[in-house]
Amino acid sequence: MKISKLAEGPDHTWYVLGRDPDKSDSVIDTNEYVICGKEEAFLLDPGGTEIFPQVVSTVSRIVPVERIRHFLCSHQDPDIFSSLPLWMGLCPQAKIYLSWIWSGFVAHYGHEYVDQFVKVQDAGMRVVMERKEFQLIPAHYLHSSGNFHLFDAELKILFTGDVGAALLPDGHDALYVKDFEAHIPLMEGFHRRWMPSNQARDHWLARVRQLDIRYLCPQHGCILEGDQVGKFLDWFGTLELGGALV
Ligand SMILES: [Fe+2]
Ligand SMILES: [Fe+2]
């Protein structure tokens, strides 16, 4: 898998992993994000069982995996954290932050780890790693009915799960958007079909427009940076969502 250092502060560093060339074509490509502090690490949407060997070997090039003390499970999908029991075998002390509505469902991946679940209430919460603070931002119905994004105010990074996702064609292995206009067709179908609610989208837009965001980091596709973030928010605001009724 590719590794890219996304941003670095005095006490913590973000990395993005993705584009595994050995992944089966039948498995949707995912991005995994690692936040490394001095002693602890935080893994955002670690991915499915299918890609666990590649993710764990790639993460271990950045940080010893036993230092991972925090996992975000942004929502319940298998591409988010069906690898839960495998990771918890390596990092049994780690906390798993997930929406309270999905606790009993995600427990199907490994009920013996439910004591490590932090059941996040709908309004979100603050998560502290070492002395660093992150905000879990509500993003319900985008696309899951219990869904959280993670914001790092210091490095101005918003992890957005499936929002901002793109379905990339074969051979497209860039981790960052180069040309926003050219990237729109790769995002459009995904958002129209997987995002069900204009009302939820507008609610989320009103909230995140108050944040100072330099990097918008989706779980599929490419990272948006700088003025691409505002362009994305404007574009997303114009889409008609939830139109797949037949
Ligand atoms: Fe999803
Ligand atoms: Fe996803």
Image: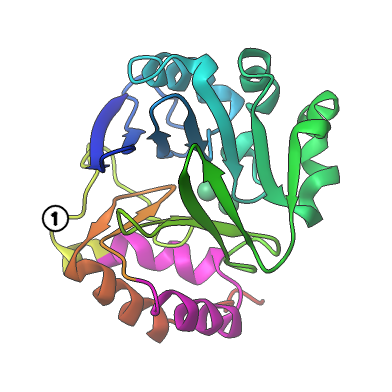
Q: What residue type is labelled 1?
A: Lys
Q: Residue at x 23, y 61 (%)?
A: 183
Closer to the camera in the image, 239 or 145: 145
Asked if one can make out residue 117 in the rendered structure from this viewpoint, the answer is yes
Foreground of the two, 121 or 32: 121
User: In terms of image quadrants, where is residue 128?
Assistant: top right
Query: Magenta span covers which residues?
Result: 184-211
Which image quarter: residue 70? top right
Residue sticking out furthest to the front: 131
Residue highlighted by disc 1: 178
Magenta span: predominant SS is helix
Among the 4 quarters of the image, the one containing residue 200? bottom right
Decide if residue 124 is on the left or right side of residue 220: right
Tag count: 1
Residue 198 belongs to the span the image colors magenta: yes
Left or right of residue 244: residue 185: left
Residue beneath the point at 27% across and 28% down: 3
Camera-nearest residue between 148 and 64 = 64
Q: Is the CB of mark 1 within 8 Å of ligand 2? A: no
What is the x, y in percent for residue 6? 25, 42
Could you say where residue 175 lies in the image, as x and y percent from the top left?
Answer: 24, 43
Quadrant holding the C terminus:
bottom right
Q: Describe the element under mark 1 as helix, strand or loop.
A: loop
Residue 240 appears in the picture as rendered: no
Residue 69 sits above or below residue 233 on the image: above
